[in-house]
Image: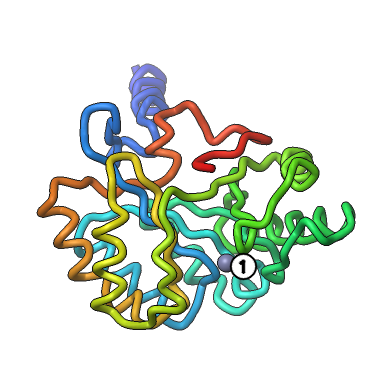
Amino acid sequence: MVLHALLAASLALTSLPASASTAVDCARVKCLALTFDDGPGPGTSALLDTLRKEGAKATFFLVGKRVEERPKVAKKALAQGHAIGNHTYSHASLPSRLDNEILDELKVTQELIGKATGQRPRMYRPPYGHTDDRVLGLAHQTDLAEVLWTGTTLDWSLRDAKKIEAAVLRLAKPNGVILLHDTVPATVKAMPKVLKELKKRGYTLVTVPTMLRGKGPTSGVSYFK
Ligand SMILES: [Zn+2]
């Protein structure tokens, strides 16, 4: 009897998918993926609090050397149900680098994020969007999918919360992927209003893997070109 009960309890536990509480079907609802690159930075923790308050999920492409500085923020992002990706160790433009340099940029960051969060990313985003077939092949050797975007806010040059808000709302579209930076203070400042307005327009804010609906991310594939 006791064994039976234990078995039943363990089955109940293992049959619960990890994402059960956040399961969203983007074939049925209007999804949008906000992605934040270059962190974790000084404003990332506040941004995570804003996302939690609004019930929004996002994707963070982390820079390895910044994970070394703020490993706990990386862990907090994953713990709150956001997706984590690799954005190289030093924010290098990859196509001009040698194979072993590119592999180092990716692999060292995989290690650092794995150590900080307990989970290795399955996606990477090339800094500046600079990539080619060789870079994609080396990412595949590192078990990484490539994730680009459908709209870029240029928040780093706007540096104004109102302008960044307008850019996100202009670029938003069903199953869109918006590029932002959690290292830009005006972006963090803009998010409470942006999230409220997107919800008002009927968007559900999801991670990139949720948007791919179980069909990815697949290593060696480039998404949202
Ligand atoms: Zn970047």
Locate residue 79, reporting x and y percent. 41, 57
Does the closest atom of ligand 1 sit within 8 Å of the Cβ of label 1? Answer: yes
Q: Around disc 1, counting alpha carbons within 10 Å, would you say few (fewer than 14), some (14 to 19), or many (20 or more)? A: many
Q: Is residue 204 above or below residue 46?
A: above
**Is residue 114 in view from this perspective?**
no
Determine whether 197 is above or below 25 in the image. below
Left-right relation of 63 to 89:
left
Picture coordinates of residue 5, whole percent (x, y)? 33, 22
Q: Is residue 110 above or below residue 154?
A: above
Q: Viewer-proximal residue, 150 or 3?
A: 150
Q: Residue at x 33, y 46 (%)?
A: 206
Q: Residue at x 44, y 54 (%)?
A: 59
The kind of residue on which mark 1 rests is: Val
Say which of 144 and 9 sits in front. 144
Instruction: Report the front residue among 14 and 71.
Output: 71
User: Which residue has dot 1 on it?
Assistant: 63
